[in-house]
Image (tube, grey):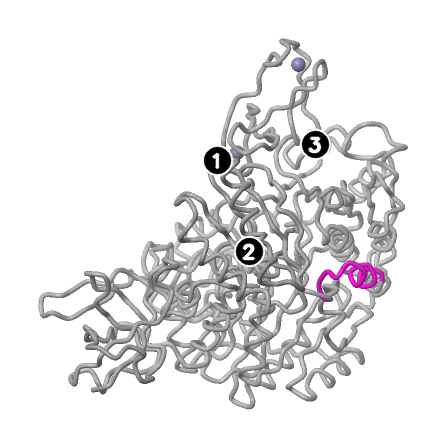
Amino acid sequence: MRAVQVAPLVDARALDRLFDYAVPDGLADAVRIGSLVACPLRGGTILGVVISRDRPSYAGALADLAAVVTDAPPIPGHLLDLARWVSRYYATPLAACLRVVLPPGADGALRREPGGRWRLAPLPKGRRQLIASEPVHGGTARHQAVVGVLASLGRPVGAADLCRLARTTLPTLRAMAERGLLRLEEGVLEHDDPPVLHDRTIPTLTDEQRAAVDTLSADPAKPRLLHGVTGSGKTEVYLRLIADARSRGLGSLVLVPEIALTPQIGDRLVARLGAGVVVWHSGLSVGERARADARIRAGTADVVIGARSAVFAPFPRLGLIVVDEEHDGSYKQDSSPRYDARQVAYRRAAGEGARLVYGSATPRPESWYALEHVTLTRRADGAALPNVKVVDMRTQAAGAISRPLAQALQAALARDEKAILLLNRRGLARQALCRNCGWIGRCPRCDVPLVVHGRPARLLCHHCGYDASVPNLCPSCGSADVIRQGTGTQGLEEALAAVVPGARMIRLDSDAVVRRGELERRLREFRRPGGAVLFGTQMVAKGHDLPDVTVAAVLDADGPLQQPDFRAEERAFSLIVQLAGRAGRRGEPATVFVQAWEPDGRAIRLGARHAVPDFLEGELERRREHGFPPFGHLVRVVVDGSSRPRVQDEARAVADAIAARLPDARLFGPVALHRVRERHRSAVLVRGERAVELALPIREVVDERTADRPHELRIVVDVDPQDT
Ligand SMILES: [Zn+2]
Ligand SMILES: [Zn+2]
């Protein structure tokens, strides 16, 4: 009788190991490495994954596997290896890492059918949505254009997709349906490949692009960095590499920070590469995901574009991984498993022999240091980078918009041009403050100031959602002098109305863009001819190609520098350069304003000159001095619980235990962090040379302390943290 080792898909550190099971004769043919199985454990039957087929470590009688679950395909060997690597590198229980490589929906509840068969809960049917079909020629010129798009797609499509592709709105589609120009009805689409508007026009590469493609096509084993100024045509370079992989029968994976924020790149890939492209985004239903997953496995889809979780897409043969906008912090997952898709991509490319390209206009110091660079210095349309003016806010009157910026906005709008303003703070105002006694509205559960939001104004906590009214009188001294301090994106609307009354204003932030499609609607509104101001959080700086923008501004450029984080300068710098890249895209002369309280700061000064290499070299020098990445790795261990003394004691004990095991590592802390949701928190930062050498001992410490510590204390380990 054969035996297998199974990892139970159960999230308990105590069960985070492999269990031996005997394989009954009836199952011997069906069991593979990677198979999902039902197995008895602790009195129940749980779902697990077959990891290996070694001799059992236990000499006694083994329990039998109950069944092989055939509703989902086995996990391919290379993904199983990747999950085990993620578990080791990120000091995370294997179950959580196996979940990210499971087929969508395979993690559902296990249930026993009347015949004794074990099955997964069935996947939901496709998503019900409004579907457009049956185009009929006629109507206005605008109607005919929409009819033309629908006809060329050659099949029914979701109304939302049609709106995007035909650059129209739902009311227009409804009006057309009433006139009989198309059919609009609720239903479930039969197939969910993205609709394709073919675009076979292949642009001629610039000399720089050609050289980049050549270099990136050499020696596939060598990962490289494509450093290209915004607008230099990185996507076209990616497209050539994808086409090359496809011609050799290999799949391509294109990672982007947030696909919902940059739908254009997905559309462009689909238009050029046609069928076989999967756009993997959070709006897909489980059923749609499962079908896309099956197509990738079968090889009928060979290009996947998606955010960080797409790094685990089950390609049978992977030829290329592109990590676009590689500087973006959203590649790091902030819940378990806390993996960084950029690091996983590195591992995966090495393991599967795939070419790996990281791309950005503002690369990370880590990538700049470790990778060979390929540079695109010029914009593909020949336009110059915009002129940047730093405004010293100490010389300006109070308010979010300085005088030079106000004048530039007025002039631009008078010429029917557009402007983009970036302010990385949501809400009406940063806080409510009593000018008499200094009282500040604070969250009673999180030790942070409450943010003023909405109309009528409320006080909201960005950590826990706590909500209170803004007091008319100061709760501390009774004074009526309670003011709002520090304008946020909502408050900017008022400030703008005073500067450019009557201008078309479009806000982009996570409060304004809640529903799917809202972002595209707002961007479409901004693209309409005529003057307009787009303003919001860093969402406004993310890869949108917007016409006629002659003024752009970072309103609070040194805001990120107030964070006590070694990446603060990198963030401030990248925000300026990324936003500057949105202006003057079609060759219009443009000006970028950088409003700063410390205009001589390095990030501000060099950002204003687009001096990326200078900034990175200086940043690397500073990091080398302090042993920060890439000259070392960090692991952050956070203890949290309801009692401050217990949290402090535990953090101290964890720090001591780590110090004992890792005598060469440098420890910082424990330091108390602000409370979140009534949980006290304390953090220990560990610095060492190699992440794996830190992760394993730290994990052992955490596991050991599980037995001793009071049950309600939690310990979270974050390897290569983004926030420190
Ligand atoms: Zn007061
Ligand atoms: Zn709170």
Q: Secondary structure at mark 2?
A: helix
| Marks 2,1: beta carbons within 8 A | no
Residue at the disc numbered 3? 487
Residue at the disc numbered 2? 657
Instruction: Measure how far apart labels 2 and 1 are at the Cα level.
Output: 21 Å
Image point (63%, 34%), residue name: 490
From this viewpoint, which residue is outermost toward the front? 660
Nearest to viewer (mark 3 / mark 2): 2
- Compared with 408, 304 (above or below) is below
Image point (72%, 66%), residue name: 630
Nearest to viewer (mark 1 / mark 3): 1
| Magenta stretch: includes residue 10 | no
Point out residue 245 in the picture as x, y percentages from the top left corner: 58, 85
| Magenta stretch: includes residue 619 | yes
- Horizontal relation, residue 218 to residue 156: left or right: right
- Horizontal relation, residue 425 to residue 232: left or right: left
Q: Secondary structure at mark 1?
A: loop
Q: What's the magenta region?
A: 618-630
Q: Nearer the viewer, residue 632 or 395?
A: 632
Q: Nearer the viewer, residue 471 or 64?
A: 64
Q: In the image, what residue type sits under mark 1?
A: Ser
Residue 145 visible, this orientation: no
